[in-house]
Image (cartoon, coloured by chain):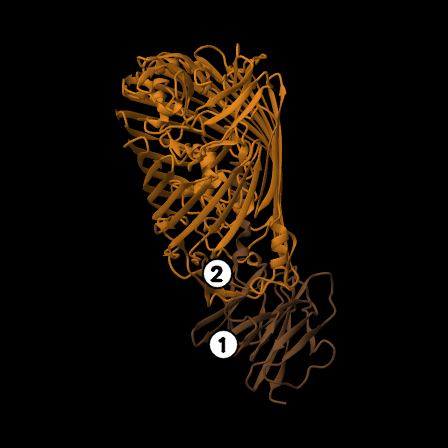
Amino acid sequence: MLQRALLAALALALPMSACDDMGAEPSMLDAPRFLAVRATPGALAPGDEVTLEALGWRVDAVTWAACATAWAPTDPPSCPAGEIALGSGNPLTITAPADVDPLWVRATATAPDGVLPIVRALASDARADNPEVLALDSGDGPLPVAVAPGAEQTVRARLSAAVDDGERVVSYYTSAGSFTPFRLYDEGVTTLTAPDAPAEATIIAVVRDDAGGAGWLTATLRVEAP
Amino acid sequence: MNPAWLVAISLFGADPPEIVRPEVTTPLPDLAAALHRRDLVHAPTVTVTIDTDGVPGDIAVVSGPGTRYERAIRDAVAALRFSPATVDGAPRAVRLELALPVDAPLWQGVARRAPEPTPIVRHDVAGIVLERGTREVLAGLPVILDGGRQTLTDADGAFAFDGVPAGPHALEIPAFDHEPERLTVTVPGDPLVVRLEPRSQRRYRTVVAGKTGDATKILVPVERAREVAGSSGDPVKVLESLPGVARPPAAGPSAGQISIRGSAPEDTRYYLDGLPLFQLYHFGNIYSVLQDPWIADIDYRPGGFSVEFGDATGGLLNVTLADLRDDGFHGDVDVNVYHAGALFTAPLGAGWTVGAAFRRSYVDAILSAVVDSETARFKTAPRYYDYQLRADWRPDRTRTLRLAVFGTDDDLQLVRSEPDPNDPSFTGFRLSRSFLQVQGTYTQQLSADVGMKLGLATSYQRLTVAPGGNLFDLTFDPVILRGALDWRGTSTFALRGGLDASLTRFAVDARTPAPTKEGQVASPTATQTVISAREEGFTGDLAGWVEASWRPLERVSVIGGVRLTGWSGSFDALAFDPRVTIAWDAGPLTTLSLAGGLNHQAPAPDETSTAFGNPDLTTERSAYVNVGVRQGFSDVLSVDVQGFYKALDDLVTPTTAPGAPRYDNAGVGWVVGAELLVRLTTPIVDGWVSYTLSRSRRTDRPGDPERFYSADQTHVLAIVAGVDLGARWRFGGRFRYATGNPYTPLEAAYYDASADVYVPRAAALPLSQRLAAFFQLDLRISKTFVFDTWELVTYLEVSNVSNRENIEQVGYNFDYSERQDITSLPLVPSLGIRARW
């Protein structure tokens, strides 16, 4: 019996099997994709209005739904007590149900290869203020307007002041080239490797706190021969 | 000629080179049947004089299963007849040391331990005969003076001649397992120490042996097991090359875990000298936690085991400790790619012998250099150490006390300096596992027919798993008592019985999601509900068992038993396990067996936990049938075939209904299979072929489609062989083939913006696809250098000689849009060196 306890606990190691250095770069925006959902205010206030906004890449016609109970609208299992249709639009303002905490909302959009779902939990114990990306710079100065093909450009997201000791993670996305590392704690400096061909790169930094809050900022960088 | 009966020989005769050895002319006895010990696995060893008519006499049991059996052993040997030994054509009386086969076609090597010592007094010519290198005393060898006078070495290997005139004399010691020695001695002179060079094949006469006492039982002597290529000298790893054992994965969270006969790894129990051993391997299963010089043999029972053991629906592995050598100070220093270790033993007198051992890995130093990167580094690179203290007390032949203190400490901490690109909550990982166990076993022959064995163990066990910001910290301190009585009633009836009890204090501190169970799709940790729980308390179980061995016909034995187990504390249940085995010795080399019964086991503690599971679960059950045929074809070849079927029910399975407990007992399953074990044993070449054909299926819930068990492997083949090349060179190889494991292909279900991860779902029916087949060839060459008082063993091992990329696991990129196979290690050479004295 006790030997089983040891083996059962080792099953917690399962997430270690994920591959983090293979396949498509998570920072590359090469297909329609949801990146984040922001609720304003960040903390769920049952009966109050909350504005939902999905950040996506080449995503439009966003439709929203929520679970009627505090249950993630996943598949499987899907919402056991049914879903509440919230409407369409991005952003969309809704009235939070009075007795569902956390409230799981799901945004979907139609993409060429299927439906893109994204879910997000809104909870009353979340922080009211979302973190923000105030600016994107190079770490030691302003971000240049253009970089050479194949060049490496450092990028850093300037964040709003932290409200507590909670951990904030910034993810970097680009429509041309790739970021390494893709994710950083707080105001760490990442590196954009520009594509070998001229392009106009849209770069996006998304900051998330450990309570589900999110904010983002988009910038453009030209990749062209000097 | 049966060389098995001529392990050691001494002659009262003339020129040794002309010796013709005696042969057994009567059928070999089935000792296990004669002794009513179908579980008899240790070959008794006797010394016996064969007179010129081939009649045995002066029979002395050197080693055996216990003094209560000595009479029966002597009777069995006395009933044998031999062709007389001859010297230059003339019949001569000889004295032999015989290792009696407990399994007619098989045999064990000569017993290491000599009989009771006798003192040596001063003589004109006197000395002691030892084996070169091991310093093992050689008893019963002839010593010839001046080509005429002769004597035998006694139990201490000593010999003496009196009345020898002063001056030079020729001394000759012929031997079969050693190179003969001729030397000149001068009288008067000092006592001699004669060291005989062992012949190359001697050490390898012991091979995989087996005995059907339980439904299936395979005994692997450690000397043979550590020579298996690919094991890096770890004898316990021989398990991976035996029938019924699925090829364990080499990577992933279940790396190295042993699945036996289609059951889960946690359904198999490990024991050390019959007492529970909660951790057999260091993490990753890279090496076992026990120092192999102190392992006598590895007793593997894939299923249908005696009622002496319970709480397991899978298999059983019992590692038997070897007696500490009491013939002087001995040591063993072992250095290989994993660790360096040392071991020492010393006799203290009054029947006491003590020993100490320590081992420390240096995998951490290697991996730290390899793995350190900008994004991840080892705070504590994987490292382990283990230690053992032992004391044996053998005041006489009827009593043995064996005390052991042993433990391990394994630790691994990986820290990410940046968030994981797939799962930002995975900031690192810590796995720490340690234990300290103190145990003692005491055996005593209470009377001619009654024997007793008591075992007491207590330990401190701790496991900490901390993936990301989560934590699971478990400590438990069990106290375990096992006692058994063995009564040989009549020549056809014997009875055994015993009690097992354990009481365990446990404490859990957890902030983690519930573990992902077999067959489930693992979701990223950050998307799962974290359960915070602190639990502590006591849990215990008490079991009583009785087993009768009855021989209604000369060649038929029936062993039936019942076991009643009760659990109380964190889990309350009662289980009744009846089991029976019928064996028919259809011929001198043929045994048929039929077995059936029930096994129950308690759910895993997390499954019955109030916080993580369902305290109202009941036991899981396995009903089995086993049919076996064992056929010997000669002294060197035997074939075992076992067929089995297991019906599994009341399996613990996750629920999906809202509001329901996390688990219930709705799962069922079945396993069917056949196992083949072909064993070849010659003085030069030995090895075995193990093949298992099986299918293991599960139905998680009523109405669900039946699926494969995740470690189901249709075909598992292992071919193990070793060749003595002479001059102490030995070459060995192991080839393994196994059907790939089933797996569930995944795809992204959705993107969880709260956790910032993609969440997967099954893209097909669970476990409906298979990894590519596994095959691997490992080679090993070793050379033993023998010096007067010590040996040096060196080996080179090459794992995965063909450099095949065996797929161990399927991995995915961040959004599950791309799949990548995770492969096992490429060709890896490794060196080892070992000194022992």
The numbered mark at residue B811 is: 2
Give the chain ID for the orange colour.
B
Which quadrant is home to the C terminus of chain B?
A: top right
Q: Quadrant of residue B327?
A: top right
Rendered location of residue B310, percent (x, y): 45, 30
Rendered location of residue A109, percent (x, y): 48, 74
Q: Quadrant of residue B123?
A: top right
Give the chain ID for the brown colour.
A
Residue located 51% across and 78% down the image: A60
| Label 2 Cα crowd, 10 Å radius (few <14 / some 14-19 / many 20+) | some
Residue located 46% across and 23% down the image: B173
Rendered location of residue B46, percent (x, y): 42, 18
The numbered mark at residue A31 is: 1
- Judged from the image, the secondary structure of the residue bearing numbered disc 2 is strand
Residue farthest to the front, as pictured: B167
Q: Does the image show residue B624?
A: yes
Is label 2 or label 1 in front? 2
- Label 1 lies in what chain? A
As displayed, is residue B402 above or below residue B569? above
Residue farthest to the bottom, as pictured: A226
